[in-house]
Image (tube, rainbow, N blue to C red):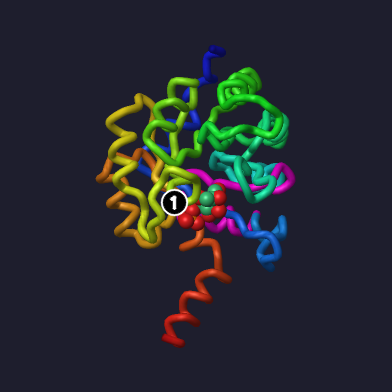
Amino acid sequence: MTPPPSASPLAALTGRLIVSCQAPPGDPMRHSDTLVRMARSAQAGGAAAVRVNEPEVVAATVAAVDVPVIGLWKDGDTGVYITPSVRHALALVDAGAAIVAADATGRPRPDGSTFADLVAAVHAADAHVMADVATLDEGREAAAQGADLVSTTLSGYAPGSPRQTLPDLRLVTDLAGAVDVPVVAEGRVATPEQAAAALAAGASSVVVGTAITAPTALTRLFVAGLAS
Ligand SMILES: CC(=O)N[C@H](C=O)[C@@H](O)[C@H](O)[C@H](O)COP(=O)(O)O
């Protein structure tokens, strides 16, 4: 296994908030300059890192913030769509991502590669890997394959994980007891109290996206509240 690069960007994340600055296809916020401004706002508010989709936006964000950029590349919307191939991963490293987030669920990848192949390629390019998983077994396997961080990103979205409206703190705790790498709580963290509960449950860092950076989704919540 290729040794991972120095631990420096990872140490800065311990006990801290990571803000996911993304917008879905068709959303008015899906605009590079707008997403870069979101990332700058996240940094100004105290985020330790930002999580950013697509190489072009990663490159623009890296040029605009001082915190580490976690890059992902969503391609498609079924099966493995978060950084699905080695090519996607290396494009993110080329764009300046310090950490590459990638699906580590063990489902087939479109280029026939394995998650271990992706880890080896990213480590050889001197960057780190955040494994997006849905289950405890996937997290264990990802850590064994060299992931530098394991995140609960896909719990509730990929097969084998419980559908729920709250963060999967059970998975956070189980992973924290099972892997030697930092565990990140990600997915449906909607309040500061939930973020703190995630740390208490064993997370090393917490990612918040929608609750901070998605005005369309947040507006819909209020509109639905008025209609009920
Ligand atoms: C499942 C999936 O594709 N999650 C994505 C991963 O990058 C993003 O769409 C989420 O916004 C992110 O994980 C943060 O989660 P939340 O927005 O719930 O705070």
Label 1: element kind: loop
| Residue depicted at 44% across the width and 87% down the height | 226
Q: Quadrant of the N terminus?
A: top right
Q: Quadrant of the C terminus?
A: bottom left
The quarter holding residue 199 reads top left
Q: Is mark 1 within 8 Å of ligand 1?
A: yes
Question: Residue 166, relative to residue 219: is it above or below?
Answer: above
Against 113, residue 78 (above or below) is: below
Residue 28 lies left or right of residue 80; in this view the side is right
| Of residues 48 and 88, the one drawn nearer to the viewer in this rendering | 88
Q: Which residue is pictured at 35% across the width and 49% down the height?
A: 168
Q: Is residue 128 above or below residue 226?
A: above
One can see residue 43 in this view: no
Q: Residues within 10 Å of mark 1 (few under 14, many from 20)?
A: many
Tell me where the magenta segment starts and ends, as one range: 36-57
Q: Amino acid type of disc 1?
A: Gly
In the figure, is residue 177 to the left or right of 84?
left
**Is residue 58 visible in the rendered structure shown here?**
yes
- Indicate whether residue 219 is drawn in magenta: no
Residue wearing tag 1: 156
The residue located at (29%, 36%) in the rendering is: 174
Say left or right for 17 vs 57: left
* Of the pair 69 and 91, the residue shown nearer to us: 91
Q: From this viewpoint, which residue is outermost toward the left?
A: 200
Q: Tag count in the figure?
A: 1
Q: Quadrant of residue 22?
A: bottom right
Q: Position of residue 181 (x, y in %)?
A: 39, 27
Classify residue 41 by image quadrant.
bottom right
Q: Residue 147: x, y in percent? A: 49, 26
